[in-house]
Amino acid sequence: MRILVVGGSGFIGTALCEELHGRGHEVTALARHPEEADLPSGVERVMGDVTAYDSIEAHFEGQDAVVNLVALSPLFRPAGGNEAHFAVHRDGTENVVRAAEAHGVGRLVQMSALGADPDGDTAYIRSKGLAEAIVRESDLEWTMFRPSVVFGDGGEFIPYTKQLATPYLTPLPGGGKTRFQPIWVGDLVPMLADAVEGAAPDDEPADDAELDEELTPAIRRIGDGDENPHAGRIYEIGGPEVLTLAEVARLAHGADGKPVDVVSIPMPLAKIGLSTLDHVPGGVLDALPGVPRMGSDQYRSLQFDNTTDDNDVAAFGVEVSALRTVAEYLGVDPDELED
């Protein structure tokens, strides 16, 4: 297959390009700065910005499938303010879908987010929900992923946690009780690749009767002629365990041999503090050591858990127990840290 990975220079994008290239596909990575990506030599690099349709449109010609991974981080306030989420997620997705339809691309895999909802509590969640609506209303054969936070080499979740929760004595909103279900990038990427290929797990073929008729378009045949068992599906993907922010902080700093003692900041006080940062220019925050670029949206995001209702990894023949934990990735023993 000829596959275009939009956002192919990013954390997940580089890993996916390598995975797809290793499976024998013709892969093209589209990014604003593709020359900066550490990609296999056989992966083509093209330049484009999803917010500018004319810069990406031509690259969709001749592609069998496209993966849209372009996203801004929900962990930090965007440099362009919260409106940047809508420019990148909603408008960018609209441009990707438009280009794919214009060039007859058969398949789209869209990276969404847990809790995506046009009426959600944060700009990130609302913009992701609006992007999902655009994909569902398209003529494309689509699959959407809603992962929890993704960790791994080059990812931002562990560094973000270490920045937000300093070692030794650290104040955290609500005592750091917000829950996450971290998924290792090395576990997530093969699932994305299977969805691109339309591959069902060997031992348990997908049951098309379970598809949600309201969300699912007609399943079409491309490539080798097999029906795509992932068409029209939205997958919630999480790791093997649920961890609080405080627990992730203890693991992350424990890997450096440093303990963490959490002091709880009452949520109303945290709201005042983080909302105040809305009025501080991002450049000023970037210049302050140890102060993350946050705001009221980040406060709101800490009020709800980032966990799956039903972990859908089984759709790819994966057992939850086989997934890599944060502790395993960091090389620490949680029991020893507790002692």
Image: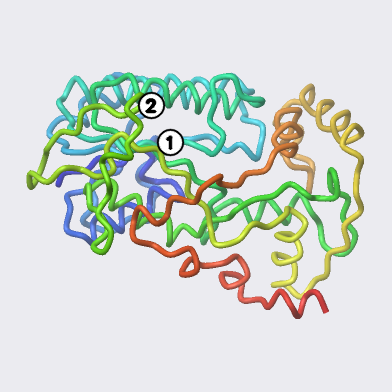
In the rendered view, tell whether residue 171 sits above or below residue 270.
below
Q: Which amino acid type corresponds to the residue marked 1 in the rendered image? A: Val
Occupied quadrant, residue 76 = top right
Residue ID at (53%, 58%): 239
Query: Which x, y percent locates residue 194?
Result: 28, 52
Residue 165 vs residue 123: left or right?
right
For label 2, the SS is loop
Q: Is residue 228 visible?
A: yes
In the rendered view, tell whether residue 275 sits above or below residue 247.
above
Mark linked to residue 228? none
The front one of 255 and 118 is 118
Circle 2 sits on which residue? Answer: 50
Query: Which x, y percent locates residue 327?
Result: 63, 70
CB of mark 1 within 8 Å of CB of mark 2?
A: yes
Q: Which amino acid type corresponds to the residue marked 2 in the rendered image? A: Val
Q: Which numbered disc flags the more N-terminal residue, 1 or 2?
A: 2
Query: Which x, y percent locates residue 174?
Result: 85, 44
Q: Is residue 6 visible?
A: no
Specify few, some or many for label 2: CA neighbours under 10 Å numbering under 14, 14-19, or 20 or more.
Answer: many
How far separated are the C-alphas under marks 1 and 2? 8 Å
Residue 82 vs residue 64: left or right?
right
Residue ID at (62%, 30%): 78
Mark linked to residue 70? 1
- Which color scheme does this rendered protein use? rainbow
Residue ID at (27%, 37%): 231
Q: Residue furthest front?
A: 209
Query: Which x, y percent locates residue 321?
Result: 50, 68
In the rendered view, tell whether residue 270 sits above or below residue 214.
below
